[in-house]
Image (cartoon, rainbow, N blue to C red):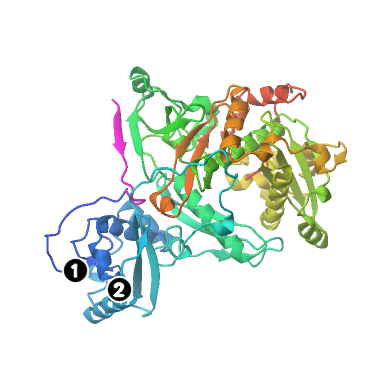
Amino acid sequence: MTVDRTLTTSPASEWRFGSNASTGAQPVVWDLENQEAPPPGTRVFRSERTLLVWPAWAAEIDDAHAAYAMLRSRWAATRPPIVQGQYSLGNPLLGRRTLVPRHRPNTEALQAMADTLSPRPVRLGTGWQVPVWELDIVTHCIRRGELAVVVRESAPTRSDHSGPLRRRGLDDLPLIPEILINPVCGMVGAVADQRLDWDTTAPVAGQTPVWNDGRVRPLTWSGQATSYARSRTAAMLESLERLVGARQHTGTTVLASQADLAAAGREHRVPGDFGDYGPAAYRDHMVPFCPYDLHEWVASESLRDRRAVLVPRDLAFFGQSLSTSRWAMVCSSGVATGSTREEAIAFGLMELIERDAFVNSWYARVPGRRIDVESVPGLRPLLNRASLLGHRIELLWVPSETGLPVMVAVARAASAAAVGAAAHPEPARAARGAVEEAWTYLPERVKAVEADRARCLDMRRDPELVREIDDHPLQCLLPEGAEDLDDYLGDGPTGPLDEVVTAGPLARMGASGLLEAMVDSLESIGVEPLAVRCTAPVESALGLETWSVLAPGLAPLDFGWHRQRVLTMHRPFDYARNVGSVVPDHLSNRPHPFS
């Protein structure tokens, strides 16, 4: 049996809509616990201790039912974790007797305020930007949030060959902070925290709760720059990228077995095409692939010729809840956002190439070339501060069959080290990206190691104890982890950046040309990359595109020693041979230190 299912374009499509209203009914106070669509004209909503109101015009828009679903979902996401979990399950929180009473004077005052302060509709692309006021009956505090209501999909924006790699810089992106982060109905969360305790950069971080595998999991995002303002912008962009890359917001899913797809002649890829898991992986939320089991699939497009290829949904969206058993557990690798289709896909593919090179060189012990970090332009302020703090930074060029410059950096403090990696057609950009990533996360690594040093030592003795993403960088405690890092960096001579790696033709290409060049180079080693469009309607309204790139055949970056697919693949041995290195007899048994 094969069933195609089209998703609603609402991010809250999991909420069930019902109708219990009569046309022309008077506005009512609607319980936020109610999953049913409210009667037409409803503009006041209540919970255990709050009243929410939007302007009169918001109750009359064409997408009013979708707006309520989004309000309910995003309001719940800004509540404490216990409320998030209960709303995600569709469970009532409390008996109706404890809900806020109608409070008619408060309700009328809130409605008057909403109509006075927001008398006219505000468009957001093909949708609306709806102001929502929340009154806390206990504290009598009124807060305002902005709800993005965009449900219509738009065609992808395209790049041409004459365009730049990035159409717009970070500071030029038309992000609307108030719809993304606010304490009432923020799309990605209630707040973004400034990390005042870090002594390297000025990071801003937050999290978005998503429902996955029977519980609410925090989807973390952050931005790291030398100013909190710029970090906040980067954090907001990453929050959107993570949210739409984790959960499918638009498009079609196919419910079918692999055998049914093969019988119907529908081209597809199976989990084994991306590397097999070892038996231990299936003790934790996953089952082995079976061609006769029903599974969810989504459409991808080949980057070679644009033909449609179905892929398992859990390989395309890293935080997706499934109605079937799970075949894979993946991360955000390959998910990228840009101003155009080609820009997003190019950066997603660069990330996969970077991580393939890092993972293979780590496990196959393929040597790179050491770079004098002092020779990298644009790093002088960072290096001065590192010297002041007593930190040491090292940089390594790592080979890739694609010719794309890939860099790995190690930043060391007294008790811990941090590893960063980056790829970019301009070698200096790749070098700065790797150094800045390692440098940024060093305070967090030091704090984590010093908080539980005994557990870090246990994980070094027994790799099976490395279970989650946060466990991997804890391998870099010092001095015990220094030998692994020194072995990876090698003891070869250190040279200036422009002598170790030079800018080739890729550095002069725009997004379209770079993407074609990378696809051609991957084809030469038997890899055909695929791309799944993740773009949510609200992103289209903001002029953004997000795509998830998959590259069956490249080594994946996995977390948890029991989930290391690279250890079952022949890819590390082929990689060593392709880049002219000694092919190892066996792979390293040290978990990679990346996160």
| Vertical arrangement, residue 407 with respect to residue 579, above or below | below
- Residue at position x 76%, y 44% from top? 481
Circle 2 — which element? loop
| Vertical arrangement, residue 64 with respect to residue 331, above or below | below
Magenta segment, prevailing SS (helix, strand or loop): loop
Q: Where is residue 61 in the image (x, y as percent from the top left)?
A: 25, 60
In this rendering, the label closer to the viewer, 1 or 2 = 2
| Vertical arrangement, residue 144 with respect to residue 522, above or below | below
Q: Is residue 447 magenta?
A: no
Q: What residue type is labelled 2?
A: Pro
- Residue at position x 60%, y 48% from top? 470
Which residue is under mark 1? 28
- Residue at position x 30%, y 36% from top? 5
Which residue is under mark 2? 119
- Residue at position x 59%, y 29% from top? 554
Q: Position of residue 143 (x, y in %)?
A: 40, 74
